[in-house]
Image (spheres, helix red, strand yellow):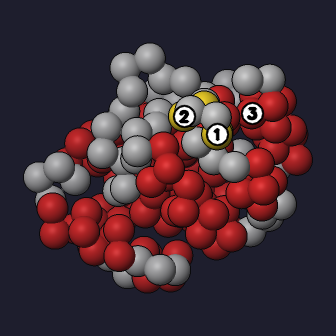
Amino acid sequence: MSQGPFTNAGSTVLFNWWQGLKHDTGGRARLRRCHTLTEVTLEPCYQSLYHHLMLLPEVKEFRERLRERLPAIAALAAMIVSIPEHGQPIAKQMAQRIGDRKRVSEPRFQRLLQCHEPEEIFQSLRRILPLLDQQVDLLGLANGIYYWNDRLRKEWAYAYFET
């Protein structure tokens, strides 16, 4: 995962866009109310992120996959209220214990890992983020959605179950 749309300038664009949502409360609220990725693509604040990323030369080779995955990244980013200072991998956050239970139950985590399509990933993570107090590493989330494949799902499984 050393190369991708969220390294260098791409990560800066995403972070600055997310910071801007703090001032665009209407745009943030509309993104959070989107129930499908098609709805997300119709939002002006999403289009702003999309166009800023697509202008970056380093993103050129990633455009096709990014078009498919960016709506989920944007809508879920709009749900994040803060980024933990010491960014822990999301799967480890899900496995953290609160009392005698994990923040995200094993069945819910397993359902997430069974997702393949961006719409499924979006719907599953949309339900999981509130269980994490909407505090996750923005770039970790973005890269997780962008690179979602068998290898990444295995990495998340190892991280979740090692805790």
Q: Quadrant of residue 147?
A: top right
Q: Indicate which disc residue 64 carries.
A: none
Q: Describe the element under mark 2 as helix, strand or loop.
A: strand
Pick the residue in front: 127 or 59.
127
Q: Nearer the viewer, mark 2 or mark 3?
A: 2
Residue drawn where x is 25% and y is 63% of the image: 28
Q: Quadrant of residue 152?
A: top right
Q: Amino acid at mark 2?
A: Ile
Vertical relation: 145 (above or below) 28: above
Pick the residue in front: 81 or 28.
81
Q: Position of residue 71 (x, y in %)?
A: 50, 66
The span from disc 1 to disc 2 (Cα, nearest Å) is 6 Å
Q: Where does label 2 land, which residue?
A: 98
Q: Nearer the viewer, mark 1 or mark 3?
A: 1
Q: Amino acid at mark 1?
A: Arg
Q: Describe the element under mark 1 as helix, strand or loop.
A: strand
* Number of marks in the rendered image: 3
Vertical relation: 71 (above or below) 54: below
Residue drawn where x is 23% and y is 42% of the image: 19
Q: Marks 2 and 1: in contact by CB < 8 Å?
A: yes
In the picture, measured across the screen, residue 125 lies left or right of residue 109, that is: left
Q: Where does label 3 land, which residue?
A: 160
Q: Where does label 1 land, which residue?
A: 101
Which comes before the other along the chain, label 2 or label 3? 2
Residue drawn where x is 54% and y is 63% of the image: 127
Q: Amino acid at mark 3?
A: Tyr
